[in-house]
Image: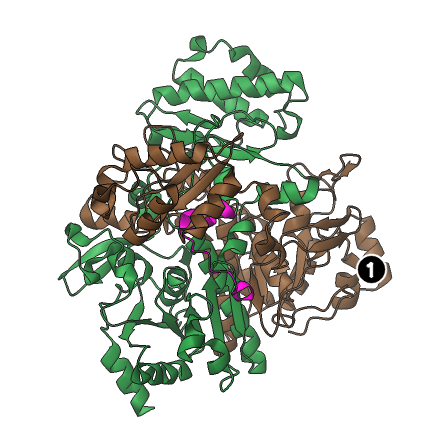
Chain colours: A green, B brown
Amino acid sequence: MNALLNGLRVVELASDRAAWAGKLMGDLGADVIVVEAPGGHASRSYGPFLNDEEHPDRCLWWWNYNTSKRSVVLDLVSDQGRDDFRRLVASADIVLEGEDPGDLDALGIDHTQIRAARPELIWVSVTPFGHSRADLHEPTTDLTLLASGGTVWSCGYDDHSVPPVRPGGGHAHHTASAFAVMAALTAVVHRDLTGIGQHVDVSMLAATNVTTEVNTVDYLYRGATNQRQTGRHASEHKTMGIQVQTGDGGYCTNPLGLTTAGNYQSVIDWLGELGLEEELPEFFFLQMGVERGGVSLKVLGQDVEATEIYRAGREALYLIASKLTMAEYFVQAQQRGIACGAVYAPDEALADAHFQFREYPVEVEHDELGRSFTYPGLPYTGTSIPKSIRRAPMVGEHTHVVLADLAQG
Amino acid sequence: MTATAVKQAAAKSRALSHIRICDLTGLLAGAGATRFLAAFGAQVIRVEQPAHEKHRWDFLRGGMSPDGAKQGINFGGNFNNHNVEKLGITLDLKSAEGKALLGRLVAMSDAVTENFSAHVMERLGFTYEWLKSHNEKIVYVGNSGFGKAGPYSDFKSVGQVVQPVSGLTFMSGMPDMEPAGWGFAFMDHMGAYMMATAVLGGIIARNRTGEGQFIDFSCTEAGVGLAGPELLDSTVNGRPMRRPGKPNSNSDNFPPMVPHGIYPAAGEDNWVAIACRSDDDWARLAGAIGAEWARDPALATFAARMARRKEIDSRIGEWTAVQGRDTIEATVRAAGVPVGQVARPADRIDNDPRTAAWGLWPKVQHEEIGETRVEGIPVHMSETDWSISRGAPCLGADNDFVYGTLLGLSPGEIADFRQRGVI
């Protein structure tokens, strides 16, 4: 079976904002051509670098966000470059770009100018506030967008003298890029039926705003302002902690605590196997948890007995965790039917047996270096899901072949 | 397949109006995926159990009315948000007659979506082979925490399991403190977005090849894939992500910037994010701060600022702590430097013209809740834009339409199925 997005051509103007969108479509089999300025796009300087040696073709930011793409260098400031760009775009199903509104217009290659002659083209713009607010020229970064968009308010510690926290990784870009892909494919489904393309305007600030789960909805629905708490959902009222420290200094989460009678019985058994019953003063409450048929999360704070049982359950988990390693506690809790997650670092997750079994990490061949490196793969499995991804292109690596193909029509 | 029109309050997007989804999802990780498709006009038929059995209904379905005066199975605010523009039917998936009805629904759908625990569909008898026996071209997308195969496939999973195991919780925090993690289920959202991507990709592939397919989506793997370039720094350069000083997620960044952080403003729990992308940004910020320490020529280069990052952060914190957050934001913005207040919900929902002008908070009409605001879509499409006006369906609200108009059952048959608890 062909790759999922086989047959779609995406022309992407290299950017921070939409790079992950192009990568996802490329990894899924689309022919993604990333257009860079002479010398390569600025993101090739972001680092980190292979062996810490700064070079546009050794930048791991570029490697991460540009897999399965081909690179064409065009100087869009020159007439020749713009002509080549127009010819290239004429071969595309989708154009993907993250330029500030107005910049492409000034060059004569904006979506309005190009789509006038090619209404079947789908053109996706990813900008901080959307093209409808082209009047705003406020500079932004991932950090400031996540602050303005609600992510940061919701994340941090119980202690509010510590600043709220921006989760690392580049998620303002990831979130907007996810919407760029969904919207682009929606437009493809529509175009395949009608022959009509369109302009797709993605706002990064809006994307972040609708990606804070309960923190937006609780306010919209009942005016609640949730407060950040260590390692768990922000909430209008303080909730019990869910993060336990393990004997090796790591952490695990128990997001649901103990709710079912089975949960309470399995923790009683677990304490017994570890010889820890005597160490838990609240042991008696666990038996009550079994006899009550468990404790519903919805009555916590209202039903005193249920709340004390639930609290005893947490104490039992804290005690057990302190005697085990992070990996042991995570797996054993789950095997006993208790929702639990090890707070892995991402590289530790990549090395975990489960993800290895699923062949999630992939070896990406770097022929230019004569070796391969391990990358995160695709989170999908299926007959049309590619099992491998290609390394990011070197600066202008495919300029000649792509332009020659266009010349041949 | 042609979706028969249902009465709607507003003009619907025609982008996906020819697409029908047999939707077995729930919570946010699944329901969030079909929400997007519904907003662009797809006919999403959400299938729910008819009578209450323990843990069978969506955990978010019930709740209190916004004023707290009423409660019931149709009052969940988050359920309403995640299921706007969908049809709702009840169907007992465990009964033989229920299974037969599901088969008829699959036969007239383009895609089947679910986010049950990994092996529930198999246990119910709804394998891909079974779905295909009712519709050769069906696109089936399953979304689970750990995927359908592998040692952890039976593990219990919610957002606060996916985020830690994938590494995203680890990447959120201050140095030498426990992980701060996420104050919400970010991966329920991202999982939903990537699930919708798979559904759309499957439909596009079917349109080209005439073949359906099954796609197994693992939310935890999606989380690992969002770690960014630091993960390659580990796999390529052998630099473990767990090391002293890590994480330091407000300050550390690729590209690296100094200053780059979240600083206190005057008042209770007020904060402002500031980021200097370049030496020029710093020169302008230093000018705006105006103090002698900031004008120190020794701080003009990135390397010098990086070496004195703690000192700079502490000085900026002293500068911001005595000013109102609006003042800081205005001053830094006027200097052309990226800045953003740490917005509370009211700031960004009621008082930010950038989200209001977007139409980001549409009002919907819900049969029992009445009129409420929900989240819009952060995308506008020039030809087939989204619309959201109908609230989530009350339990079984669209049984007559789906079983009568779409499946062609008689009123007598529907009444009989209802009376016997099949629907």
Let me know if residue A87 appears in the view: yes
Q: Does B172 sit above or below residue B113? A: above
Q: Which residues are magenta?
A: A131-148
The quarter of the picture where residue A33 lies is: bottom left
Near-viewer residue (B161 or A294): B161
Nearer to me, A298 or A397: A397
* Residue lying at 28% horizontally and 54% vertically, measured from the top left: A375
Residue A141: % across, % down: 40, 52
Per the image, the residue denoted by label 1 is B413
Q: Nearer the viewer, residue A40 or B117?
A: A40
Q: Quarter-wise, where is residue A68 in the image?
A: bottom left
Q: Secondary structure at mark 1?
A: helix
Q: Is residue B249 magenta?
A: no
What residue appears at the point 58 percent right and 60 percent down from the top-left corner? B112
Amino acid carrying label 1: it is Glu
Q: Eyeballing the image, is A205 above or below A85? A: above
Q: Quadrant of the N terminus of chain A?
A: bottom left
